[in-house]
Amino acid sequence: MKSRLPLPPPSALLPSFRGALHDRRTAAAIGRLLGVAMLVCMVTGVLSHYLQHPPSWLANDLPARPTWGYRLNQGLHVGVGIAAIPLLFGKLWTVYPKLFVWPALKGVRHALERLSVAVLVAGAVFELLTGLLNTVQWYPWPFSFVPVHFAVGWLLTGALLLHLAVKWPDIKAYWWQRSAATRALPQEPENAPDRRSLLTGLAVAVGAVTVTTVGQSFTPLKDVDLLAPRHPDHGPLGLPVNRTAAAAGTTRVDTAAWRLTVAGPRPYELTLDELAALPQYEVELPIACVEGWSKNAHWTGVRIKDLTERAGAPGAALRVVSLEQHGAYRVMDMGRTYARDPLTLLALRLNGQVLTPDHGYPARIIAPNRPGVLQTKWVTRLEVR
Amino acid sequence: MAGRYAVGALGLALMGLGASLVWAQSPWDVAVWLVGAIVLHDGLIAPLVLLVGLGGALTRPGVRGPLRAALVTAGCLTAIALPDILRPGPKNNATVLPLDYVRNWLVLLGVVGFGAVLVLAVRRVQAARRRRGL
Ligand code: HEM
């Protein structure tokens, strides 16, 4: 008779978890915060997308108020995204043992459920990782960031909704302190101290990553901005820069030769001196970068509304052309709501000083409630549309 | 019940939209990065955390709580500091990544460690007082 080696079943080779924290109640508690964070990121992300690339039927009706709208939107997107990083780690930690369930696939339904969770996990890690790396302008992947981050955002949001529908019974059972399943737990369950310390640790971690980065857009906290890729105090004339004059090829603009050309029903040209002789206005408006940093500044210049009025088309929508030769934002379209706004300027001065080359000398756009990439620098031409 | 199915169906529809948008870009590269995200977490980060957790489990329950909170916080701070520190290549301009991130990261780890020690010390004093019936 052949003696058979007692082979262990495959499940015995997989890690097993006795740790007290991999329970459904903790998963639901962290999950609902993470879910809210992901939805905030998706909503602010989609708003940012349409503020940058409005469909033509919307382009003339985008709101120019509140002036800090885009600043808040993008600050929230990046701030809540960073705060979600500890939550995602915490959530994945509580559900990690599920990766090793045995049998791995119990049937079609189970297979689909696991597939949707895989999409959810992959999408969440992917969005947080690509978003974070984009803020430090690091692009180690072979695809272009914006459209792919946008696409995976939809994939992730879909997987999240599907997940909520599938897990609804568990979510409902553990939602409240007084929910049925929560009350069925022992009064002071054995894992209570461990569970509390995990949740406290996550709360402290969320606070820590937020406080050390949010100062890049929430300037009152700039002194503890230790880990953000930007700092409000670092930049010429007290304002950070993204595209430099060197990159744009506009370091030495010949002031004597420069003209502002305004094309419209009554076209005209202005020298820099003539422009500076027109009525000047001072406004306080933020530069709010799509990458999440932002800062308020004082701008002085000529109202766009006055310039279009002089061209015989008061408050008309505009196409703005920069001196730069290449670059995705050389030509910028400005809808009517911004073009007729009294706060929208062709600015010549920043914080009381003449613009530096990196800030768009000799003239740049500043408008309320718009992403920084659309605050066109080194302007040379305005076309009434 | 109907609501549950509606949410699930909406989720499937949005997943379809997302997949078609990915398809219009570079689907294989994105797929590699999506699968890579799972492998990075489940294959590398999670086992590392488990190992650290095993070490922590050897400590006394009173020490374990603050230790766990400190490690979670330090780990997350490290995760967001790494891109600042490791980003290769020349920077776009001097206002991008203008700080000394290695120094700031080490300072923050020090603060977290100090905070944990402080919590443990306070607890110890409180426990001693309780024992003396104060
Ligand atoms: C749940 C996670 C996230 C979702 C669903 C999400 C979704 C989105 C969406 C839909 C956009 C608009 C893309 C477009 O304009 O076409 C966007 C843009 C952006 N996201 Fe996220 N995001 C997430 C996490 C993050 C994180 C964690 C960060 C950074 C820390 C981040 C940084 C950015 C940046 C910088 C942009 C602007 C890109 C640009 O226009 O240049 N995102 N996001």
Image (cartoon, coloured by chain):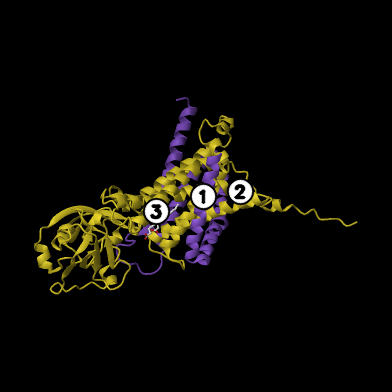
Badges 3 and 2, same chain: yes
The residue closer to the viewer here, B65 or A127, is A127
- Colour applied to chain B: purple
- Tell which residue pokes out farthest to the right in this image: A1
The residue closer to the viewer here, A302 or A287, is A302
Which mark is in front, 1 or 2? 1
Tag 2's secondary structure? helix
Chain letter for mark 3, please. Answer: A
Amino acid bearing label 1: Gly
Q: Residue A83: give x, y in percent of width and height.
A: 42, 49
Q: Residue at x 20, y 73 (%)?
A: A252
Going by the image, does A146 lie left or right of A373? right
Amino acid bearing label 2: Pro
Residue under pointer 1: B11
Q: Earlier in the sequence, mark 3 or mark 2?
A: 3
Residue under pointer 2: A97
Chain letter for mark 1, please. Answer: B
Residue A151 shows in this picture: yes
Going by the image, does A363 lie left or right of B8? left
Q: Residue A316: give x, y in percent of width and height.
A: 21, 59
Q: Residue A232: give x, y in percent of width and height.
A: 28, 55
- Tell which residue pokes out farthest to the left in this image: A277
In the rendered image of this protein, does residue B35 appear above or below residue A188?
below
Tell me, for residue A188, which label it has, or none.
none
Residue under pointer 3: A46
Q: Is ligand 1 within 8 Å of the beta carbon of the residue shown at mark 3?
A: yes
The residue closer to the viewer here, A257 or B47, is A257
- Report ligand 1 position as a quadrant: bottom left
- Colour applied to chain A: yellow
Rendering quarter of residue B102: bottom left
| Few, some or many residues within 10 Å of mark 2 (<14, 14–19, 20+) | some
